[in-house]
Image (cartoon, grey):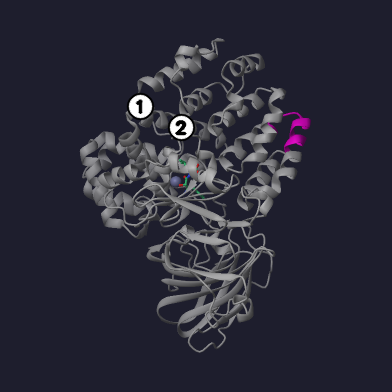
Amino acid sequence: MARLDPHSYTESSQPLAKHVALTLYFDFAARTIHGSALLTLPAAYTGPLLLDTRSLLIHSVLDPHTTAPIPFSLPSDPTPDPVLGQPLSLSLSAQSAALVVFSTSPTSSALQWLSPAQTASKAHPFVYTQCQSIHARSLFPSQDTPAARIVFSARLNLPHPLTAVMAAARAAAPRDPVPGEVGFACPDALWCAPGRSVEEFIMNRPIPPYLFAFAAGDIAARDVGLRTRVHAEGGAAVLDAAAREFAGAEEMIRAGEALFGPYEWGRFDLLVLPPSFPYGGMENPMMVFLTPTVIKGDASGAQVVAHELAHSWTGNLITNKTNEHFWLNEGFTTYAERRIVEVVQGEEIAALNMGIGWRGLNDEMERFKDNMEFTKLKPNLEGIDPDEIYSQVPYEKGFQFLWRIERQVGRPTFDEFLKKYIAKFKFQSIDTEAFLEFLKANLPGIENQIDLKQWVEGTGIPPDAMEPVSLIYSKIVSLSNEFKLGKIPKEQEVANWSGQEWELYIENLPKSVEPSQIAALDAHYRLSESRDYEVKVAFLQLAISSGCKEYFGEVERTLKQVGRMKYLRPLYTALVQGSAEETKMSARRIFAEARDTYHPIAQGVVESILAKHS
Ligand code: BES
Ligand code: ZN
C-alpha cells in the first residue's frame, strides 16, 4: 500500500477512474446537493478501491449494471483527518464501475451558498464551486489527486428560474426533467417536481479533479469575443463593465497560441463571481472564474485574465502530479502570463509585474523565516494543508527559475523548448523530476551552467535570481526609498501612474512608518479610497502596521466588502500581529460579523491567522 499523493487516499496499486458521470439535485433551501457519481475504471477490477471524501453523507454504493449493492466502509473513527477528510473504501469484485449515492453537507468546503440578500440581484440564491486544491472531495467522492485525470458528464437539476454554467461544454439546452434519469441521486418525485429543470454538460478532455467547476443562480451573459462570453450574477451593470474590461481576451488568446501552441479547450469564457470569491481568478477549463474586484474600469484586470488564460497551457494541459510540484503549475503560468502581458501591454508593464512579484517573493522569505521548508520550490507537504501554506513562492521562485533558464539559453531557444515541453506532456500530470529530465535532454549541458539542485531543493532565493530592470520600475523603487527621507512623490512624478505603479510604490515602502507621513501621503493621493483593491489594501496594511487608528473604519468596511484571500490575509494579519489587545479584539469582532459572508476556505484561513496570534 502506498499513496500516490500526500493529499489523497488514492492508492498507487489501485486503478484510476477514467470517467465520472454526475447527477446533481440542488436543494437551495437546505444548502445541500443530492447526488450520484458513476465512476468507470479502465477494466474490471477485484479488490478495495479508496476514494477521497470530506463532509459527504454516503447513502449507498451500487453496481450500475445490476443495481446490486457494492460493499463499502468509512473509518470507524468518525473524526475526519483535518487535511485529507475521510477515505471511502469500496470493495469491488470483477467490476469496472461503481455508482456512489451521496449528499453534500451545507458546510462543504468546495461550495459557497449565497442567500438572495448576499447576491447583487437580491432576488435569487447563488452557489458556486472552488475545488482547488483539495476540495473536490467535499462535492463528490473521487480520487482527488491531480495525478488522476478524468473526463466527465454532469446532469444538474435546478429550480426555476435559476440556470447553471460549468467549466465544460453544454451538451443540451435546459429542459424538463424526465422520470428514470435520476441515477439514484434522489427520488424521481423530487427530480421531476414542478418548477425543476435539467441542464447537461460534458468535459471530454481529461482534467484533474480540482478543475471541476460549476455555478448556479440568476446568471446572465454577453459575448465579448469570438470564443469568449462573459457570464455574471448581478445583471446588466456588471456585464457592461465586464464586457469592456475583457474586450482584449481574443488578442490574448492569439498571443498565447503564438507563444505556446494551439488553444486546446475550444471556448474561453469568463464568469464574474460575487465579491466573496476567495481568489482573484481560477483557471477552470473553458470558463475562468473571476473576482469582481478585477473590474476596475481601467483594463488592468487584464493581468489576472492573462494569468488564468496562461493556465490553459501550463496547469490545465500540463498539470502538477501532486501539490508538492505546484510550481510546475503556477511558476510556469506566472512566466507565461508575463510573456502574454509583454505582447499585449508592452515590456514596461511586464517588468512592473515582475517587480511586484520580486517584492512579494522577498516578503515571503520573511514570512517563512522560521519554516524555510516552504521557501523550497519543491517542499515536503506531508500533513500540510495546501490552503494554509499558499504563498508566492511557487509563483515567483518558479518564475525566477524559468527566467534564469531563459537568460542562460536565450529567448529563441527557450521559446522553442517551451513549445516542445507543452506538446510533449499535454494532458498529463507530471512531477519536477520529469521536467528536469526533459530540460537536460533538450538543453544539453544546462546542468553545468545552472545549479538546478539549488533551485529545486534549496531554501531561500538563489543568488542568480534577478530583480527586473526597467525605467519605470527603477524610478518607482527609488521614489519608495526617498519616502524614508520624508519625501512624498510630486504630482508630475505620478501623473501617469495606474494601480500597479502605486501598488509597487507602497509595497516597497518600509513595513512601518511615521503615522504623520501616512496621513500626508493619503491627504495627497487618497490611496485609502482607491477603487483598485490592490492599492487600497497595500495602503491599509501599511497604515495598520504603522499604528494609524483613523483607518480602522476603512479596514473594517473593506473586510466586509470583499472575501478575496489576497486582501483578507494581509489585513487580518496586520491587525493581530504585534498589536495592542484592543486591535486584536476588533479583528475578532470584525471576523465574527463578516464570517458568514466569506467562502468556507477563507473562513478557515482567517481562523488560523487569528488562532496563531491569540
Ligand atoms: N490557481 C490559482 C488559484 C488557486 C491556487 C486556487 C491555489 C486554489 C489554490 C489561480 O490561477 C491564481 O493563481 N490566481 C491568482 C491570480 C494572480 C496570480 C494574477 C489570484 O487569485 O490571486
Ligand atoms: Zn495560477
Quick one: label 2, few (<14), some, or many (20+) residues within 10 Å? few
**x and y percentages locating residue 164 in the rendered image:** 52, 61
Q: Tell me which residue sits at (44%, 31%) in the image.
A: 358
Q: Is residue 424 left or right of residue 563?
A: left
Query: Which amino acid, mark 2?
Result: Asp
Report the side of 118 relative to 148 (left or right).
right
Q: Is residue 297 visible?
A: yes
Q: Which residue matches tag 1? A: 348
Residue at 71% over, 30% down: 553
Q: Separation of disc 2 and disc 1 at Cα?
A: 17 Å
Residue under label 2? 298
Q: In terms of depth relative to the viewer, which is nearer, 35 or 156?
A: 156
- What x and y, as percent, mark residue 291? 53, 44
> Which is more foreground, mark 2 or mark 1?
2
**Residue extent of the magenta highlight:** 575-587
Q: Position of residue 545 (x, y in %)?
A: 65, 26
